[in-house]
Image (tube, rainbow, N blue to C red):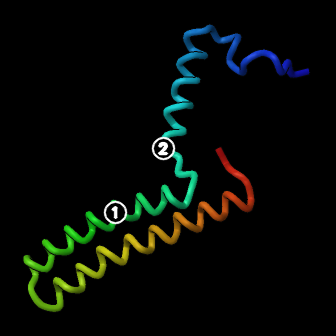
């Protein structure tokens, strides 16, 4: 029978249990939980993609630079759509962490 009162890693020693708990808290900082967080990430990625696309326009004048610019920004929108889908999926079917 599992004792609910004891912490999960109580038998391993307080140092290791504290260490594991600390890494779990740090791991939670890097988990995207809401659509707002996704939009912030997409905005940051899009800003970088546009800056990179402007460099491509200078390096490759003409249609080549425009196609590379489009590829940079298009990749960000596809990644953003997948992240939003993942948030909806986790909300509908549960979390895997």
Quadrant of the drawing holding the N terminus: top right
Identify the residue at image location x=62%, y=8%.
13
Answer above or below: position of 56 versus 61.
above
Q: Position of residue 57 (x, y in %)?
A: 13, 80
Q: What separation in Å lies between label 1 and label 2 (alpha carbons)?
A: 16 Å
Mark closer to the chain start, 1 or 2: 2
4 sits left or right of 92 in the view? right
Identify the residue at image location x=48%, y=60%.
38
Rendered image: mark on residue 30:
2
**Quarter assignment of residue 5:** top right
Q: Position of residue 51 (x, y in %)?
A: 20, 68
Name the residue that disc number 1 marks: 45
Quadrant of the drawing holding the C terminus: top right
Q: Secondary structure at mark 2?
A: loop
Mark 1 neighbour class, 10 Å CA radius: few under 14, some 14 to 19, many 20 or more: some
Answer above or below: position of 47 versus 18.
below
41 sits left or right of 88 in the view? left
Identify the residue at image location x=72%, y=21%.
8
Q: Secondary structure at mark 1?
A: helix
Identify the residue at image location x=8%, y=76%.
59
């Amino acid at each position: 029978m599992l004792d609910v009162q004891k912490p999960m890693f109580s038998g391993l020693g307080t140092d290791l249990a504290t260490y594991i708990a600390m890494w779990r808290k740090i791991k939670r900082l890097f988990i995207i939980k809401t659509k707002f967080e996704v939009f912030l990430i997409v905005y940051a990625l899009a800003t970088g993609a546009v800056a990179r696309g402007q460099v491509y326009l200078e390096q490759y004048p003409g249609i080549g630079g425009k196609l590379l610019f489009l590829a940079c920004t298009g990749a960000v929108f596809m990644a953003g759509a997948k992240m939003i889908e993942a948030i909806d999926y986790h909300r509908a079917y549960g979390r895997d962490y």
